[in-house]
Amino acid sequence: MSFTLKLENSRILKGIVETLASIIDETEFMVTPKEFTISAMDPSRICLLKLSIKKDNFDDYKCSKESKVGLNLDDLDKILKRCAANDSVEIDFNEKDQKIKIKMQREGTSRTRTFSLALLDIDIEEIPMENLLNIEYSSKWVIDPEFLVEAIKDAEIYSEILNMKSIEDQGLVFSSTGQIGEMNYELELDELIETDISGTSSGAYSLTFLKAILKISSITEKLEISLKTDHPLKMMFNLLEGGELFYFLAPRVEEADFDEDEDMDEF
Amino acid sequence: MGIKINELVGEVKRSITFENLFSKKIAIDAFNTIYQFLAIIRQRDGTPLKDYEGNITSHLSGLFYRTINFIEHNIKPIYIFDGKPSELKLKTIKERRKVKEEAKVKMVEAQEKEDFKEAKKFAQMTSKLDSDMIEESKKLITFMGIPLVEASSEGESQSAYMVERGDAWACASQDYDTLLFGGERLIRNFAVSRSKKVKDTTVTLDIEYVSLSKFLNNLGITREQLIGMGVLIGTDFFPGIKGIGQHKALELIKEHKSIENIIKNKVKGIEIDLDVVNQIKDIFLNPDIKKEYPKLIWNKIDYEKIEELMIEQHNFSESRIKNALERLRKKDSSKTQVSLDRYFKK
């Protein structure tokens, strides 16, 4: 098992690792001959992140056999933060070493810095994502991720929840209510890049978890959001240099909806 | 207190955080928790918190803030109160009472000498829980909307049963005796919400999680054999055999297969009446359990009643209590966060 991944622009990887590190301590990088993927769920099992970048989107990609490496994200984040904006970044792994190497090279120079990071022996749970991926959403729209960033920051003034509502033939409303007042952020259809909205759907989502994706918005130009009442929010980011990032966030619901017999699983 | 098997447990225990317990129902050994508060929540010289009338209030302070912490983390606590202690436990309780009385004398001596460190040490050993304190604790818990169950006898056996029945996910207690009662999942140090990022430094008071089946598998013994080890090491019901610790007990039980054989084979230094052994085993294997208890419901918080109890009756600082309650109000008025688990299933 070995692999080499190289990106001329380190921005994407930095943004993703920073986001991941804010929700989970450790994760596994999975590298196959076709693509690079990371799946991670926070310990309270509220949000789930799945990143995949195809081989062709890398500037150099060598992998002959599926490899998995467990990493401490906090440490990886610290290392990647040492990368300047115009540095290229290369990650190398060789089975005989129990570590990965991260090589940064300044654009147009031969100046290279190499960092190594010990692997972790972690037992990552297989996330049963299939049913989640198969949920049929009644409302889907593509927006400029900056809109969502604005809405998150607006909502924070009032509460810890962002409400989302989409109405067929009308558009979307982000809102938040608190003791001091409320805010409404309305987007009519012409503001949306693509829409597929039938009926009315709404959901309430925790800002704490939504904020985790703020970093991502700067490395993506389109955001596809799928909404279904009292279901997880599904967001799909098309990354600038290629690649997809899925983010699922469990909703907040009225207490009465709470099913009494759940949450008995082992963590 | 309880059986001392910390080193054996060390191999299988896991450090977890409040996040891992998100939306889980945890049956908490109430007496065990309240005793801790009485021991820990004290002033520098060892005096517990008191209201203007001189009533001790350390337990209320502890329960109040700890429970808020649980609610804020979306954990669903259930407090389990002990009922009547068994005959064997009464003996232990008598012994402990003696120790407490001795400690009290030493505490007063130290206080007179103004040796606060010593005074505090002995003061922590004098904690007594009277029926008024228990009633006040139950009131506070109820006002906070948290269900409580009154066990017929040991709270730990009741919790173990509730976990088995699926009414609770885990038992929380400092005592490993819970494992002997068959509690499949045990949580210890159920207090600190360790923030996510702790790596290089070891935090000693991590929340500890032990799975009984993993523990038994790892040792290669049955629960009955673990109880046999308990007889040798000592539990809340029997002092054990002097000079036999956890490792020796494991060795003996593996060699002789059962506590009865150990006694029959006349292993040196071990003389216990088989009747006593049977009584102890009976406590753990056939405990007095309340099988019918009210449905567990997490009610709305009664803010006014809490303020009345804490501020008016027991003179806690009005601003502190109100600030803490404000945190709950914020949580209370908002919708409940669910986890993704329910969407994995269908």
Image (cartoon, rainbow, N blue to C red):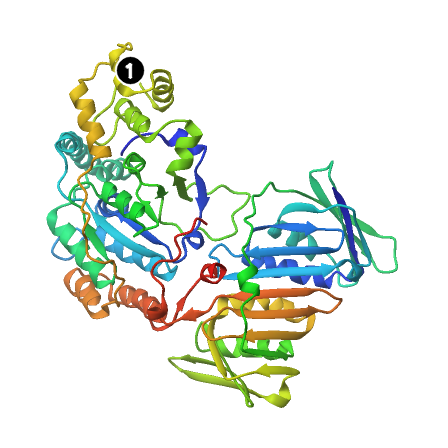
Q: Which residue is at a point 20% across and 37% down the rendered structure image?
A: B287
Residue lying at 24% horizontally and 69% vertically, measured from the top left: B303
Task: Locate residue A123, reporting x and y percent.
Answer: 56, 43
When the figure is inspected, residue A216 is found, relative to residue B77, above or below; the finding is: below
Query: Is residue A82 in sight in this rendering?
Result: no
Return the residue nearer the eye: B223 or A192: B223
Q: In the rendered structure, which amino acid carries the disc numbered 1?
A: Ile
Label 1 environment density (alpha carbons within 10 Å; few <14, some 14–19, many ≥20): many
Q: Quadrant of residue B277?
A: top left
Q: Chain of mark 1?
A: B
- Asked which secondary structure carries label 1, the reply is helix
Compare residues B178 and B63 and report the one nearer the observer.
Answer: B178
Decide if residue A155 is on the left or right side of residue B54.
right
Judged left or right of residue B103, residue A27 is right
Asked which quadrant contains residue A49, the reply is bottom right
- Residue A153, image x and y in percent? 54, 76
B335 lies above or below A79: below
Q: Which residue is mark 1?
A: B262
Nearest the eye: B214 or A147: B214
| B304 with respect to A225 (left or right) | left
Whether residue B85 is situated above or below residue A211 in the rendered picture: above
Task: Kindly tell me whether residue B341 is visible in this rendering.
Answer: yes
Find residue B321 and report its horizontal and vertical position in percent. Answer: 27, 64
